[in-house]
Image: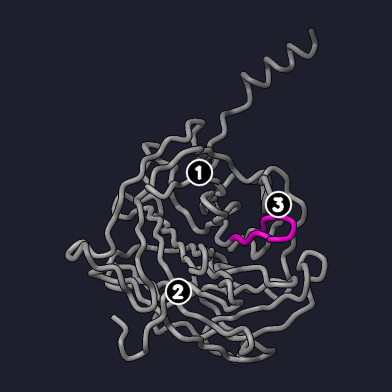
Amino acid sequence: MRFLICASLFVLLVPEWSGKARISLLGPDPAFTVARVPLDESNPARTRVGDLVYLGGVRLRSDDSQFGGFSSLAVAGDRFTLLSDSGDIVRFALGRNWQVHDRSYAELPDGPGTGWEKADRDSESMSVDPRTGAIWVGFENANAFWRYDSTFRTAQAHVAPPVMHHWPLNKGPEAMMLLPGGGMVTIGEQDRWPGGKGRGGVVFAGDPSVHPRRGFRFDYIPPEGSSPSDMTLLPDGRWLILNRRFAWFRFSNVLTIVDPADVKPGATVRGHDIATLESPLIHDNFEGVAATQEGRATVIWLVSDDNQLPVQRSLLLKFRLDPVARGDRT
């Protein structure tokens, strides 16, 4: 009885919470639609852009206002995992006919902070360990990495490496991937190392949650006016970096290949550009890239972050890497 009286007084006397509302989450119904999109609306027959051949793509749409904001993706066969910058997880299977099935929604089980605000779950990069299936996620506001189990149900480890402590908020580990044989590489979105050029990069030797101080720094020079937004490992071991530019109220993206042999302590690395997505071609705020292999073909997937704005789109595009002579690229 004493407990009930105290509880009643608490409800009556304590004012309602008037601070920030908790971050919105995707609803329980994993419903979204897909619609095919061309590479070039003015020329639907066009398929080539630089060293890439367009194999198709879709726009993802949902009535749920929280749907979208995708900043990274993982692809395994016909299974896709999209991770938003609010910590929402969207999974589905995509058939060769571009039809979607086996949809599911989830959210990160843990992460920096309390998870109450969007900044706590601002996940910008993701990489899957092919040996264990563990999933690493980079959080830009916390300048931290978290490792989850292969089902995204449990957080296993996390670290905020000292080398990244002074990276600005909202400009942290935008691009990250695991390296063959162990280790990780990450590139900050906009800051450079003191006295350096371009964007600051770090190669971690081994698991950064175990050895956060082992590794070295390097500088990455993105295409002019651009910043790195994601990266992935190509089947041949080279690095594919997705760069983003925003100018005159339009987004454009450049894909750049870097030879890991050029990435050494203190090195300044440029790479070579293989394709540019800009008007009149399909373009948006592409923030996620993944590479897979289909037979002997290297396949590149891109996903865009619509910032949950009606003027942008959630796009999932598929390309085949098909290099052409440097003087014959269109």
Structural distance between the alpha carbons of marks 2 and 3: 26 Å
Q: Alpha carbon of mark 2 to alpha carbon of mark 1: how far?
A: 26 Å
Find the magenta span and give its range.
126-136
Q: Where, quadrant-wise, is the N terminus in this rendering?
A: top right
Question: Three-letter amino acid code at disc 1?
Answer: Phe
Task: Give whichever of discs 2 and 1 has the lower sequence position.
Answer: 1
Residue pointed to by mark 2: 243
Residue type marked 3:
Tyr
Q: Is residue 173 magenta?
A: no
Q: Which residue is identified by label 3?
A: 148
Q: Residue furthest right?
A: 210
In the picture, measured across the screen, residue 26 lies left or right of residue 278, that is right
Q: Residue 4 lies in what quarter of the image?
A: top right
The residue nearer to you, when weighing 79 against 141, is 79
Disc 2 marks which amino acid? Asn
Which residue: 66% across, 46% down?
152
State if disc 1 and disc 2 touch (CB < 8 Å). Answer: no
Q: In the structure shown, which secondary structural element does the residue marked by tag 3 occupy?
A: strand
* Residue at image mark 1: 92
Give the numbered dot on residue 233.
none
